[in-house]
Amino acid sequence: MLRIFIIYLLSLCATQLAFAGDGWIQPKGSGYFKLSQYWVIADQHFTNTGGIDPNATRGTYITSLYGEYGFTERLTGIVYFPFFVRALQNEQVSGTTGEVILPGDAVNSVGDTQLTMKYGIVQNDKIALSGSFSLGLPFGNNSGGRDGSLQTGTGEWNQMFRLDASKSFRVGELYPFASVYSAFNNRTNGFSDEFRFGAKVGLLLDKFLIQLSLDGVESFQNGDANFNSDGTGLYSNNAEFLALTPELSYFVKDSWGISAAYAGAVSGKLIFARPAYSVGVFLAL
């Protein structure tokens, strides 16, 4: 059980997409906190048919706080708060004359926040199974910039129900682990509902944790037609993707460390077609 608990604490060094972690929960009085910087810069996007088209170079930078705290032996509270989000579009310059065709634009704001309560359904040596409920709070700007197309949030409330299952294994002297999850995201304000799914494998080697995650989002296509004026980005309606994310975390001391991740979409619709990056500093109590 001690090894499982240690692996759980380390496995929480995840990217922007892994709000609720894996199947394990925080023990009562324990916590995990992380300060992260995420960014993506894209000059092309996946169309609504899955093809790739060019676009004016756009970028999003998100500085966030993430925290987990064990209220009881079964109940964990989770907060994700992007306290500074910058969305921008670079100026467009004529390749012939060098003149500025369209000036650059940017908007700074807080981002959409997520509150989660996570309950440990089964927590033993064989398997860790948990269920969670998340509430999305529309604190971000959904119509920034001169034309209203720069966004730091969706402007809609959403509720997500998620189920996680995790298991650790013994392979010689090593203890790799594997996790899977599925979720239903109920969205409002014209956005289509979503089915989310994913899997993760990880291995702890001395002070390093190596992880590889697969995350997917499928739209139910039951909302309004896409209404983002640019048609693509992090906050588009009916966006879909399948992404691979390798992550590396390093414990500088027993209770804190640093992490880095790279997320690349294998396929997608109505999202940026460039990789996203994140780095962070975490504290495990």
Image (spheres, rainbow, N blue to C red):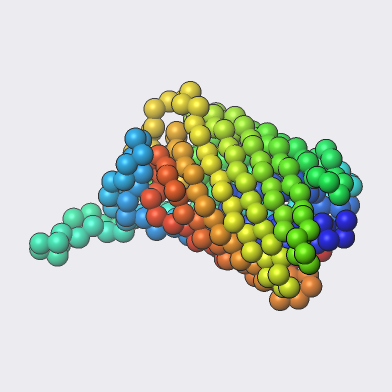
Residue drawn where x is 68% and y is 66% of the image: 209
Foreground: 174 or 188? 174
Foreground: 9 or 59? 9
Q: In this view, does 192 lie above or below 82?
A: above
Residue drawn where x is 39% and y is 40% of the image: 270
Quadrant (top left, top right, bottom left, bottom right) of the N terminus: bottom right
Quadrant (top left, top right, bottom left, bottom right) of the C terminus: bottom right
Percent coordinates x, y for residue 41 in the rendering: 39, 58
Asked whether, in this view, residue 40 is left or right of residue 278, the answer is left
**What is the residue that sits farthest to the left in this orientation?**
96
Asked whether, in this view, residue 150 is left or right of residue 19, the answer is left
Residue 174 appears in the figure: yes
Foreground: 196 or 246? 246
Q: In this view, does 10 lie above or below 232?
A: below
Q: Quadrant of residue 90?
A: bottom left
**What is the residue that sits farthest to the bottom in this orientation?**
252
Residue drawn where x is 59% and y is 56% of the image: 212
Percent coordinates x, y for residue 94 in the rendering: 15, 59
